[in-house]
Amino acid sequence: ISRQVLWCPSPHCYLGPFNPGLPVEVPVWLAINLKQRQKCRLIPPEWMDVEKLEEIRDQERKEDTFTPMPSPYYMELTKLLLNYASDNIPKADEIRTLVKETWDTRLAKLRLSADSFVRQQEAHAKLDNLTLMEINTTGTFLTQALDHMYKLRTNLQPSESAHSQDF
């Protein structure tokens, strides 16, 4: 991209000047926009590497609890970068597969955790190391399950008016 300054409507959002050939960090929306206009080459995040993602996947499979992800937006970033800049990402197909396998493992764990949570009639749960997208994926199911549990509990408790009176 030629040496220029970009402006966006947010109060603190001046970007640039850009110097051709020098890497610069910009927001993802801008990087994708520039890539679509063939004005830049995207450099994937450090964690978007086959070896690192294999370690993350294997660790996730080994642990019973959720392991920390390399980014709270790992799935969103992967989808965006692979959709718009796969030609800039070495071994893009392998990366797509590894992230999908990690995602599937985490969702299976989340379903098992939710099932256990409901069966044991727990009142609260820890959601450590889950991303917002993962929580939102099962949010509807979990919310409905909790609503049903609440209704069952309130129906099983005798109401105040149902107590027998002493004569």
Image (cartoon, rainbow, N blue to C red):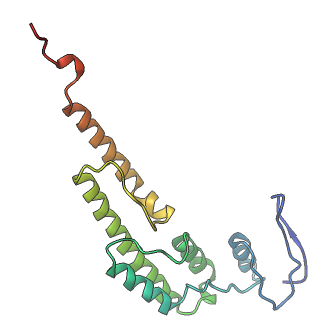
**In the image, 140: left or right of 18?**
left
**In the image, 52: left or right of 62?**
right
Q: Residue at x 90, y 77 (%)?
A: 4
Image spot of residue 76 (x, y percent): 55, 70
Q: Quadrant of the N terminus?
A: bottom right
Q: Return the residue found at the far front.
A: 167
Q: Residue at x 23, y 20 (%)?
A: 160
Task: Tell which of 157 and 94 is nearer to you.
Answer: 157
Task: Tell which of 89 and 64 is nearer to you.
Answer: 64
Residue 128 to residue 44: above or below? above
Residue 167 to residue 76: above or below? above
**In the image, 145: left or right of 88?**
left
Q: How many marks?
A: 0
**In the image, 30: left or right of 88?**
right
Name which quarter of the figure residue 22 lies in. bottom right
Q: Return the residue found at the far left.
A: 167
Image spot of residue 92 (x, y percent): 53, 88
Image spot of residue 26 (x, y percent): 75, 75
Q: Residue at x 44, y 83 (%)?
A: 56
Name which quarter of the figure residue 163 lies in. top left
Task: Tell which of 162 and 139 is nearer to you.
Answer: 162
Q: Quadrant of the C terminus?
A: top left
Q: Residue at x 68, y 73 (%)?
A: 28
Task: Tell which of 87 and 89 is nearer to you.
Answer: 89
Image spot of residue 82 (x, y percent): 57, 80
